[in-house]
Image: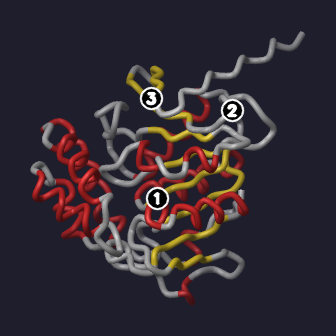
Amino acid sequence: MSAPPRPAIPIGRTRRQVMDLAGRPAAWINGGRLGIGEGTLRPLVLLHGLAGDALTWQFNLAALGTDRAVLAPDLPGHGSSTLEVGPGHVDDLARWVGDLIDAWGLSQVDLVGHSLGARIALSLAHQQPAKVGHATLIACAGLGSDLDHQFLDRLADASDLEQSRLAAAKLFAEPGPLVEPMARALTLRQSVPANRAAIKALLDANRADLSERLVTRDWAPRVPVQLIWGAQDSIVPPPPVHSIPAGIPFHLLPDAGHMPHVEAASRVNALIGSFH
């Protein structure tokens, strides 16, 4: 006798939902119109970058979630999820995401990751390819380009508003109205010593790995992947076109920096929607 169907988890919109995952909190936002377990399309799981949180995706959640669940977790060390990051390497974080997907009762999802989150998505695609349908990597850390490690250190230390303004401004191709609210949100978070310690621990755990340039045979997974990059990204500069494996779409967006899903949200949403 088969088990009764699992009821869908209700939609939380921009209200975070929290569950216990291995004895620690795991938080996420469901920004789609459908709940977990509803619909026929694979849910999209959106993974933010270092010192971000689920609301990094505020310009993408509704647009991507018209016909599927769109789940944006707070990664360990961020938002309302656990501050216990453990070893903190991208591979460990990928296993955490895989465990969260299991806890949601999902067998397969599509992944969209930004910066460190993109590298986590790539790691999960290698670790558990059957769990990943398609993956979109936005400004993926470590794909053959030099990271601005000085910026990352300043980001981890951005505990006052002036520091945060400098860090937030560098995320975009041009100064704009989003710099100030992002700086204030960063200051609010990073002014808490425990939060700052978690971000520094993650940065230290991944510094050496992200400094190594990956070659084609090392990073191309067995699942379909597309790359999206801001042409003016000075934090994780776009990799050379010749370094991208054949058959992987590479979208270079003009007039966008390290946050193309914010600066060019409509274009990025369209690229994600057509690929997934």
Crowd around label 2: few <14 · some 14–19 · many ≥20 (10 Å): many
Residue 23 screen position, x and y as percent? 40, 20
- Going by the numbered disc 1, the residue's amino acid type is His
Q: Quadrant of the N terminus?
A: top right
As measured in the structure, the alpha-carbon distance from the residue carrying label 2 to the one carrying label 1 is: 23 Å
Q: Which residue is mark 3?
A: 16
Reply above or below: 105 against 154. Answer: above
- Going by the numbered disc 2, the residue's amino acid type is Leu
Residue at 30 percent across and 65 percent down: it is 208
As measured in the structure, the alpha-carbon distance from the residue carrying label 2 to the one carrying label 3 is: 15 Å
Residue 273 figure quarter: bottom right
The extreme bottom residue here reads 242
Crowd around label 1: few <14 · some 14–19 · many ≥20 (10 Å): many
Q: Nearer the viewer, residue 143 or 67?
A: 67
Residue 109 figure quarter: top right
Q: Secondary structure at mark 2?
A: loop
Q: Quadrant of the C terminus?
A: bottom right
Q: Which residue is mark 2?
A: 34
First of labels 2, 3 by sequence position: 3
- Going by the numbered disc 3, the residue's amino acid type is Arg
Using the image, tell me which numbered label, if any, was put on residue 247.
Answer: none
